Image (spheres, rainbow, N blue to C red):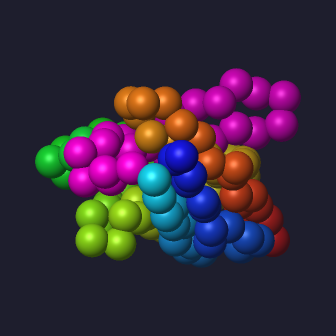
Amino acid sequence: QVQLVESGGGLVQPGGSLRLSCAASGTIFSIRAMAWYRQAPGKQRDLVARISSSGSTNYADAVKGRFTISRDNAKKTVYLQMNSLKPEDTAMYFCNMVAPNYWGQGTQVTVSS
């Protein structure tokens, strides 16, 4: 059974940084494309960043140059390094395995002074 467990969320001031982690189990992680999504209250869930099995990445325009997605296949973990955080980055962040489609439970990121 596939499980995705996120960690690393929290409260941070504008301009600060956080690193989210998503640990996978029950799958051959190295062959899976992975992604991070976020969902603010009352809004749809949007793609933040995606990384292929070979390490190719793509980002939402809103986070380009500030966020970096990476993966460690030996640890079966995908990361989201978030720098220069803004209040509009406040959301629940979800880890996603692209195919087959699995979701983590989410981790809250709040950017506020």
Residue under the point 57% across and 72% down:
18
Q: Residue at 84% x, 28% y: name it.
A: 42
Q: Is residue 42 above or below residue 36?
A: above
From this view, report whether residue 8 is shown above or below residue 89: below
Front residue (pair 34, 90): 34
Q: Position of residue 94 (x, y in %)?
A: 61, 46
The boundaries of the magenta stretch are 27-50
| Quadrant in which the C terminus is drawn | bottom right
Looking at the image, how many numbered discs can be counted on the residues?
A: 0
Residue farthest front in this picture: 1
Which quadrant of the view contains residue 70?
bottom left
- Is residue 96 left or right of 51 when viewed as pictured? right
In the picture, measured across the screen, residue 108 lies left or right of residue 76, that is right
- Asked whether residue 84 appears in the rendered view, the answer is no
* Residue 2 placement (x, y as % from top left): 51, 47
Q: Please indicate whether residue 64 sits to the left or right of residue 25 in the image.
A: left
Tell me if residue 32 comes above or below residue 82 in the rendering: above
Is residue 8 in the magenta section?
no
Residue occupying image coordinates x 75% and y 39%: 40
At horizontal 47% and vertical 58% (from top left) the residue drawn is 25
Q: Is residue 73 visible?
A: yes
The foreground one among 4 and 92 is 4
Q: Quick one: 50 or 76, which is closer to the camera?
A: 76
Can you tell which quarter of the image residue 87 is in?
bottom right
- Residue 96 x %, y %: 50, 41
Q: Is residue 47 above or below residue 31?
A: above
Spot the residue most to the left: 54
Q: Is residue 44 magenta?
A: yes
* x and y percentages locating residue 47 in the rendered image: 50, 34
Residue 70 in the figure: left or right of residue 17: left
